[in-house]
Amino acid sequence: MAMLEIRNLRASVEGEEILKGINLTIEAGEVHAIMGPNGSGKSTLSKVLAGHDGYEVTEGEVIYQGRNLLELEPEERAREGIFLGFQYPVEIPGVANSYFLKAAVNAIRKHRGEPEVEAVEFLKLIRERMKLVKMDDNLFKRPVNEGFSGGEKKRNEIFQMAVLEPTLAVLDETDSGLDIDALKTVSEGVNALRSPSRAFLLITHYQRLLNYIQPDHVHVLVKGQIVRSGGKELAEELEHSGYALFEEDAA
Ligand code: ADP
Ligand code: MG
Ligand code: MG
């Protein structure tokens, strides 16, 4: 059984169809990249997977670990091990990162019938994962994302992912707003978290993230449809030719 199976997914926003029949199968251990021009529906796909209000699925299904994902509440999706990258870069004034993360870790543990994380164990986990993604001590102690730069928010997001140990991570536009050093750190974080039991769906407009993260599969999304799928060489091809070629395909 695949970890995630998207079948003929159609979705509308405010009555307008944005996703026009997406098919995608992701197996445990795989890294998939979805690339596409602005407005092609990349963020819409991630929001449908997250269960955001206002994104209406009109056809098709999404099966996650054998369950109908679309029936689960957004919080349930998180507890079931889905991490959505854009979900966290909200600022939470006055709430320390440490407090936020501990609550999140405990929600997942409770869901699995496990006891709450002990203070010492939590600190150990935090230290280890901070090192993994080169997270600054300072950032960790500050309120969640308050006054963080774009790059700091993204680093924090990857750090949160490292602590939450998701089964499936969906990262939308992870490379936007990152300078090259931050991009490398984030990529190293993702690479360090790759495992045979975990899968990633990287959604990006730019090819440069894929210079550091080698995807197993690359898909080109144009006008709400996957017009081409291939290996990492497809990303390289896009770097040279741009999206114009594929836009003709979709028209
Ligand atoms: P991408 O992430 O590939 O740039 P999006 O999924 O953000 O594309 O947007 C795809 C299309 O859906 C665009 O035409 C956009 O204007 C429209 N769209 C997305 N979200 C909304 C929304 N909340 N309200 C109205 N239109 C939306
Ligand atoms: Mg495969
Ligand atoms: Mg987008």
Image: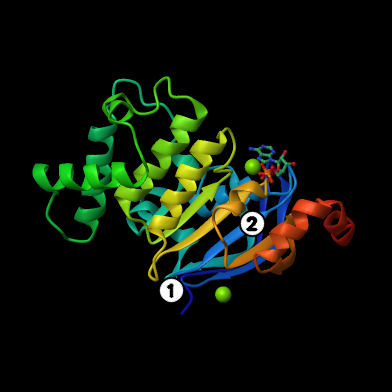
Q: Quadrant of ligand 1?
A: top right
* Residue type for callout 2: Ile
Query: Is residue 66 visible to the viewer in this orientation of the structure?
Result: yes
Q: Is mark 2 within 8 Å of ligand 1?
A: no
Estimate the x, y position of residue 112 in percent, counting from the top left.
Answer: 22, 61
Secondary structure of residue under mark 1: loop
Q: Residue at x 56, y 33 (%)?
A: 179
In this view, the residue in front, 204 or 111, is 204
Q: Is residue 123 left or right of residue 229?
A: left
Foreground mark, 1 or 2, reads 2
Residue at the spot of label 1: 66
Q: Cα distance, mark 1 to mark 2?
A: 23 Å
Could you say which disc has been placed on residue 89 in the image?
none
- The number of numbered badges drawn on the structure is 2
Estimate the x, y position of residue 205 in percent, counting from the top left.
Answer: 68, 46
Q: Residues within 10 Å of mark 2 (few under 14, many from 20)?
A: many
Secondary structure of residue under mark 2: strand
Q: Is residue 221 left or right of residue 180?
A: right
Q: Quadrant of residue 152?
A: top left
Estimate the x, y position of residue 85 in percent, counting from the top left.
Answer: 47, 45
In this view, the residue in front, 31 or 250, is 31
Rendered view: 242 above or below 139:
below
Rendered view: 150 above or below 29:
above
Could you say which disc has been placed on residue 34 in the image?
2
Q: Residue at x 22, y 42 (%)?
A: 127
Scheme of image coloration: rainbow
Q: Residues within 10 Å of mark 1 (few under 14, many from 20)?
A: few
* Residue type for callout 1: Gly
Q: Residue at x 57, y 62 (%)?
A: 215
